[in-house]
């Protein structure tokens, strides 16, 4: 008896990311970003979006986002956002604020349930998700994702929130096998599992690729099965400067240094825009691979500090 | 720092510690509650209550169940603060939590008005053409479905406490009883706790009124720092200061790095 061989690997190399993006996302498409705020954000993949000069993107995420969205806006990649909360938590996102106030981007007024409900509906293959927990907020009046509906059973007035189907989702996790079985080791996985099920195409960066046998030995821990994943790429510290727990912590100092440039630019400081663009050149455009990027943000020594912080928690 | 004359030790404590201690005392054993992002004071309040008098208080609703952080963090929704917990949930469960509601939740705002409405979206202009765009908010439903919520702010100024918010991100009592009932709201803010004072809401008018001022703060100062006509009852208490035991638990166990004192 012979058995079939040749199961296709979904693993791609860092150098193949640009080609993958060229085939899966175009100017004006809806891009979903995994993680939340300062954890599990696929920053290495986001930087490749910027290097590929993909423009006029519509951005969606789990309900909390910050650094990466602000960077995409500063780099001129964004036209519209569908993001409930955009903040660095200890301060506001300068480029987001500047672009919305200058009306160079449109920040749609959405909340967690409209976004989570949209992912949920798309993941379940239905056109909308009912919501009965909205009252009294002005967000309801301005939210483009929702419509008022009548419950067919009780006659109650409630809302439907539209299924959200991103063209491409970029996620980051700690481990995967080459077939695209993803394993989060972090406690928080946020909306990653739902986003993977809702997007047309899913690209996941991981801290390391593990043998398939390792995945099979603990199937309950596979957080996103391969059937929802199109490609996986190993990128050590691929979430930096956000954290990838338990492997490495959040580089708050780097995020703060970016925010200082972006805030100076927002306030119209004399060399504000030039300094912000120099940041993007230094950390996004110039480093063509992950080693060069790491060297640009403090090198292995800094990464070791972030590893140590994660281990101390 | 404030100084407590009410004990032998003349305890010194920060306004944020006063806020955390006040809030912790109002949480009841057996309740279920949560806080969102940037919520160091609420997290301290919940953890302190769990240590002090409410061992069966459950902290859940935002993707985790019963966290055991080793210290407080200014950023509250990542594995640093929540990685040690009894269970991890995801945003899938947020849908159910938001509809069932919690016993209590905490909110903060760029603007807060006399009816306890909260604005995190914009100041000036319109939502489409704002003079100043804020961060927005993730979950606007806990204000609606939770049995009560607390407003907990890091500042108490006329810029923050305005007669009418420019945008209602999370509803308090809207424009008073008529609009509140017309919108189908059933719950709302219980206390507004600031670095200066504690406010509650008049049950008839649903307007904010002064309940107590923290030690060393005058009623006149609170009124002057409030941008609307704050209701002041004939008698205003001094907020009961932290006890030695409360401060020790707060500093030794909940906040050993002193985030609430920085």
Image (cartoon, rainbow, N blue to C red):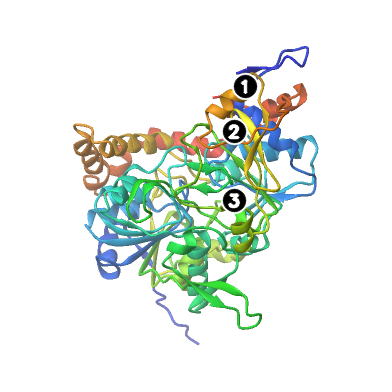
The tag earlier along the polypeptide, 1 or 3, is 3
Extreme residue toward the bottom, this view: A1
Earlier-in-chain disc, 2 versus 1? 2
Q: Which residue is mark 3?
A: B172
Chain where mark 1 sits: B
Q: Considering the numbered disc 3 on the image, is that residue within a helix, a strand or a loop?
A: loop
User: Quick check: do tags 3 and 2 share a chain?
Assistant: yes
Give the CA distance from mark 2 to mark 1: 14 Å
Above or below residue A178? Residue A258 is above
Of residues A299 and B176, which is closer to you in this image? B176
Task: Write down the residue under mark 1.
Answer: B218
State which quadrant residue B200 falls in.
top right
Q: Secondary structure at mark 1?
A: loop
Q: CA distance from mark 3 to mark 2?
A: 17 Å
Neighbourhood count class around disc 1 (C-alpha, 10 Å): few under 14, some 14–19, many 20 upward: some
Q: Are dots 1 and 3 in contact, CB under 8 Å?
A: no
Residue under label 2, please give it. Answer: B194
The chain ID associated with circle 2 is: B
Q: Is residue B57 left or right of residue B13?
A: right
């Amino acid at each position: 008896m012979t058995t079939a061989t040749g199961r296709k690997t979904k693993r791609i190399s860092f150098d193949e990311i640009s080609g993958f993006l060229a085939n899966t996302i175009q100017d004006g498409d809806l891009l979903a970003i995994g993680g939340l705020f300062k954890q599990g954000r696929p920053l290495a993949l986001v930087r490749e979006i910027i290097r590929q000069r993909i423009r006029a993107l519509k951005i969606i995420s789990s309900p909390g986002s910050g650094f990466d969205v602000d960077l995409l806006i500063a780099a001129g990649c964004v036209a519209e956002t569908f993001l409930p909360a955009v903040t660095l938590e200890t301060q506001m996102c300068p480029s987001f604020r500047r672009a919305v106030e200058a009306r160079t981007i449109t920040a749609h007024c959405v909340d967690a349930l409209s976004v989570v409900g949209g992912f949920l509906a798309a993941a379940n293959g239905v056109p909308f998700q009912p919501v009965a927990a909205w009252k009294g907020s002005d967000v309801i009046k301005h939210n483009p994702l929702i419509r008022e509906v009548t419950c067919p059973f009780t006659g109650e007035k409630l809302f439907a929130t539209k299924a959200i189907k991103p063209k491409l989702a970029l996620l980051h996790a700690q481990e995967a096998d080459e077939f695209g079985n993803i394993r989060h080791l972090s406690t928080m996985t946020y909306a990653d599992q739902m986003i993977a099920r809702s997007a047309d195409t899913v690209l996941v960066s991981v801290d390391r690729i593990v043998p398939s046998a390792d995945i099979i030995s603990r199937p309950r821990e596979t957080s996103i099965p391969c059937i929802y994943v199109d490609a996986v790429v190993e990128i050590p510290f691929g979430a930096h400067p956000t954290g990838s727990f338990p492997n490495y912590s959040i580089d708050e100092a780097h995020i703060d240094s970016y925010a200082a440039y972006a805030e100076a630019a927002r306030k119209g400081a004399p060399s504000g825009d030039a300094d912000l663009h120099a940041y993007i050149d230094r950390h996004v455009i110039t480093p063509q691979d992950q080693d060069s990027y790491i060297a640009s943000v403090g090198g292995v020594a800094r990464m070791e500090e972030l590893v140590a912080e994660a281990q101390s928690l | 720092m404030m100084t407590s004359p009410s004990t032998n030790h003349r305890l010194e404590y920060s306004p944020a510690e006063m806020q955390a201690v006040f809030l912790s005392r109002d949480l009841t054993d057996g309740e279920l509650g949560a806080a969102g992002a940037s919520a160091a004071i609420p997290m301290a309040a919940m953890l302190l209550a769990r240590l002090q008098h409410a061992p069966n208080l459950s902290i859940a609703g935002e993707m985790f169940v019963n966290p055991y952080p080793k210290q407080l963090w200014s950023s509250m929704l990542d594995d640093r603060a929540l990685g040690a917990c009894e269970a991890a949930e995801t945003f899938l469960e947020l849908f159910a939590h938001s509809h069932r509601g919690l016993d209590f939740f905490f909110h903060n705002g760029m603007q807060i008005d006399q009816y306890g409405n909260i604005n995190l979206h914009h100041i000036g202009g319109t939502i489409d053409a704002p003079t100043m765009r804020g961060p927005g908010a993730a979950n606007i439903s806990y204000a609606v479905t939770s049995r009560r919520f607390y407003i907990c702010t890091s500042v108490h100024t006329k810029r923050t406490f305005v007669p009418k918010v420019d945008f209602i991100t999370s509803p308090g009592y809207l424009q008073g009883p008529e609009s509140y009932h017309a919108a189908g709201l059933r719950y709302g803010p219980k206390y507004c706790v600031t670095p200066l004072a504690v406010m509650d809401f008049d049950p008839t008018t649903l307007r904010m009124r002064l309940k107590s001022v923290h030690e060393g703060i005058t009623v006149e100062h609170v009124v002057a720092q409030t941008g609307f006509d704050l209701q002041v009852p004939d008698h205003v208490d001094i907020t009961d200061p932290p006890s030695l035991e409360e401060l020790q638990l707060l500093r030794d166990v909940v906040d050993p790095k002193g985030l609430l004192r920085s």
